[in-house]
């Protein structure tokens, strides 16, 4: 799994962290090129993903979210579900390419799904 995460960081311009986490907010595997607390990063984003999932499936009846992208001033995160209980997190900087994050993130999620 670590090989897929490190390759994802190499493939996406501006990417600095990639992780696999459970919807419970626990880090399963991760890799970062910067000094970052990946456990905190996935725990906080798991809560956001769970909330988005509830809103989309229950309140709006729009179906389960297929991806989630949050952009901040200094931090942006792309989330992609893996099966129903896991997700892939990709953290990128301001010079990131969302298209690359989506393309390579989906591909990595498919490869990781076979492992989980």
Image (cartoon, rainbow, N blue to C red):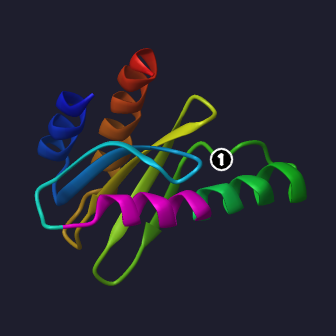
Q: Is residue 65 left or right of residue 81?
A: right
Q: Could you tell me residue 98's position as x and y percent?
A: 34, 56
Residue 17, picture quadrant: bottom left
Q: Is 26 in front, or is 53?
A: 26
Q: Could you tell me residue 83's position as x and y percent?
A: 58, 28
Q: Is residue 17 left or right of residue 90?
A: left
Residue 91, picture quadrant: bottom left
Q: Is 69 in front, or is 27?
A: 27
Whether 68 is drawn above or below 113: the answer is: below
Which residue is tagged 1? 65
The quarter of the picture where the N terminus appears is: top left
User: Which region shows up in magenta?
Assistant: 36-47
Task: Identify the secondary structure beneath mark 1.
Answer: loop
Q: Which residue corresponds to the image point at 39% horizontal and 66% vertical from the top-left?
A: 40
Q: Which residue corresponds to the image point at 55% horizontal and 57% vertical from the top-left?
A: 46
Q: Is 67 in front, or is 25?
A: 25
Q: Is residue 116 left or right of residue 97?
A: right
Q: Which residue corresponds to the image point at 60% horizontal and 63% vertical from the top-left?
A: 47
Q: Is residue 30 left or right of residue 32?
A: right
Whether 108 is drawn above or below 64: the answer is: above
The quarter of the picture where the C terminus appears is: top left
* Magenta stretch, main secondary structure class: helix
């Amino acid at each position: 799994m670590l090989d897929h995460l490190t390759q994802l960081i190499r493939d996406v311009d501006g990417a600095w962290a990639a992780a696999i986490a459970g919807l419970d907010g626990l880090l399963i595997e991760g890799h970062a090129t910067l000094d970052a607390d990946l456990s905190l990063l996935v725990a906080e984003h798991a809560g956001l993903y769970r909330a988005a999932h509830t809103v989309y499936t229950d309140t709006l009846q729009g179906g389960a979210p297929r991806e989630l992208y949050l952009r901040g001033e200094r931090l942006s995160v792309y989330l992609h579900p893996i099966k129903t209980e896991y997700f892939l997190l990709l953290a990128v900087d301001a010079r990131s390419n969302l298209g690359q994050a989506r393309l390579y993130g989906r591909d990595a999620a498919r490869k990781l799904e076979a492992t989980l």
